[in-house]
């Protein structure tokens, strides 16, 4: 066996994809994320990632109608959400809910391309309902039904709060979801592809994707990044705090990236929007703190921020509970994972790499009295 080995598969090409690339910046189906985030909206981008092309007006309307029609969750699942202890994180609840949804999915056993596209559309519509309902139940409130007319970001804020959100809030959430929608062969997309490469089903792939995203080295970093910012109570404390953290070899969540060594284009785009929302919502202090930390981490460690650094603050300024940050990443990324799962199944080969054995040499079994 060849001994070529790269820990963490760093730099290894593990497949082909037409969904997105990080070769030069980040593009989804050939469109830069800057172009999409400046001009498009989450639902249009979801359609693009899933179907391969931007929708025509008629396709966008039909897509919205399908999302609206699918924007319900079985009462049994809501009852389950009620019964899960409040101490469970929303990510864990969402992972279970993705699996539960399979039991009510009429096409669960159809692994054809067309059925998986239809299932993905239903998942896109249902995941935000679960996140909002769980939060309301935790807050001692009843879930608010989805409004089938509202686009996904507005609908999510409506279901979470039971009041119509401002256009500015909707726009900010929408842009964050566009930037979170897809990202090539990251750990969670690769996990999803591994699952379906055994000819397993889409819901299993999504459940695995959620499990992989939860970790703080991946999507879980947006919640950890906010915890960092909350440890620093004012800009005056920021320099001392970060120098001390770096001296103690602490890993600063929201910084660094396996692929983007010179900077994450999503973080660059989101920073400007986050600063604007901070101004409008009176969070200039936290922006100053973030800027001091960012400058020092960049200078001392040569590590630029990744998307989770500005996104954590953006969600904080939108008044969202920390426990929802990574679940919102899931809400956006379901489409990316599904596009990868469908692409994998369209041209499948079982993903089954090898390992270099570093255990003990071959030996003989001994009866228990001789061990
Ligand atoms: N804070 C402090 N030091 C860091 C950080 C960080 N955030 N990231 C990397 N380093 C250091 C490491 O300690 C290591 O230093 P050393 O060589 O002195 O031991 C060096 O940089 C290389 O780090 P690795 O972990 O080997 O690099 P890798 O390519 O595996 O890192 C990763 C990528 C996991 C994202 C890392 O940068 C990290 O842990 N960041 C914090 C978590 C985070 O923000 N994750 C979100 C990623 S984006 C996303 O998933 C949406």
Image: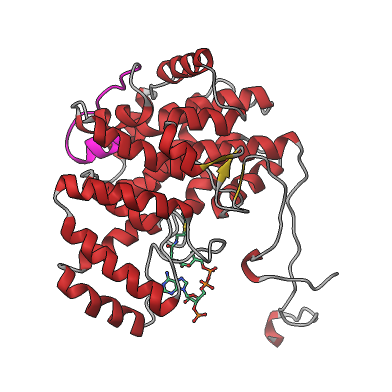
Extreme residue toward the right, this view: 1
In the rendered view, tell whether residue 70 sits above or below residue 101: above
Expressed as whole percent of the image width and height from the top left, the position of residue 285 reads 16, 60
Q: Residue sitting at 30 percent across and 81 percent down?
A: 243
Q: Is residue 140 magenta?
A: yes
Q: Residue sitting at 75 percent across and 81 percent down?
A: 366
Expressed as whole percent of the image width and height from the top left, the position of residue 125 reads 43, 26
Expressed as whole percent of the image width and height from the top left, the position of residue 296 reads 33, 75
Along the viewing direction, whichever of 337 and 100 lies nearer the viewer: 337
Expressed as whole percent of the image width and height from the top left, the position of residue 336 reads 55, 40
Q: Residue sitting at 55 percent across and 64 percent down?
A: 258
Quick check: 144 left or right of 14?
Answer: left
In the rendered view, tell whether residue 255 sits above or below residue 203: below
Along the viewing direction, whichever of 72 and 230 lies nearer the viewer: 230
Which range is magenta?
A: 132-148
In the rendered view, tell whether residue 282 sits above or below residue 150: below
Marks counted in the figure total 0
Extreme residue toward the bottom, this view: 370
In the rendered view, tell whether residue 217 sits above or below residue 59: below
Quick check: 212 left or right of 267?
Answer: right
Along the viewing direction, whichever of 262 and 184 lies nearer the viewer: 262
Q: Is residue 56 magenta?
A: no
Q: Residue sitting at 45 percent across and 58 percent down?
A: 215
Color theme of the render: secondary structure
Along the viewing direction, whichever of 37 and 43 lies nearer the viewer: 37
């Amino acid at each position: 066996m060849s001994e070529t080995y790269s820990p963490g598969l760093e730099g290894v090409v593990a497949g082909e994809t037409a969904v997105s690339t990080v070769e030069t910046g980040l593009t989804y189906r050939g469109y830069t994320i800057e172009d999409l985030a400046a001009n498009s909206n989450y639902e249009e981008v979801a359609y693009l990632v899933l179907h391969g092309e931007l929708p025509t007006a008629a396709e966008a309307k039909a897509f919205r109608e399908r999302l609206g029609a699918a924007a319900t969750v079985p009462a049994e699942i809501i009852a389950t959400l009620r019964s899960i202890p409040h101490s469970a994180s929303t990510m864990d609840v969402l992972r279970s809910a993705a699996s539960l949804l399979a039991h009510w999915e009429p096409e669960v056993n159809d692994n054809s391309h067309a059925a998986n596209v239809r299932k993905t559309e239903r998942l896109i519509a249902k995941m935000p309902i679960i996140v909002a309902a769980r939060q309301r139940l935790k807050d001692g409130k009843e879930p608010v039904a989805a409004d089938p007319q509202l686009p996904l970001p507005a609908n999510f804020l409506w279901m979470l709060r039971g009041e119509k959100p401002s256009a500015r809030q909707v726009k900010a959430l929408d842009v964050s979801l566009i930037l979170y929608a897809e990202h090539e062969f990251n750990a969670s997309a690769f996990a999803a592809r591994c699952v379906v490469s055994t000819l397993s089903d889409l819901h299993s792939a999504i459940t695995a994707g959620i499990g992989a995203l939860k970790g703080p080295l991946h999507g879980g970093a947006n919640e950890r990044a906010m915890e960092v910012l909350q440890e620093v109570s004012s800009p005056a404390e920021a320099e001392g705090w970060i120098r001390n953290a770096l001296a103690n070899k602490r890993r600063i969540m929201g910084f660094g990236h396996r692929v983007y060594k010179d900077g994450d284009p999503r973080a660059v785009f989101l920073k400007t929007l986050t600063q604007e929302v901070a101004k409008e919502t009176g969070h200039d202090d936290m922006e100053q703190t973030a800027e001091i930390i960012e400058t020092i981490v960049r200078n001392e460690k040569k590590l630029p921020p990744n998307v989770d650094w500005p996104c954590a603050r953006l969600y904080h300024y939108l008044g969202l509970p920390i426990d929802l940050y990574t679940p919102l990443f899931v809400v956006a990324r379901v489409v990316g994972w599904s596009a990868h799962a469908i692409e994998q199944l369209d041209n499948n080969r079982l993903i089954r790499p090898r390992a270099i054995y570093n255990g003990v040499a071959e030996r003989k079994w001994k009866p228990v009295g001789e061990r």
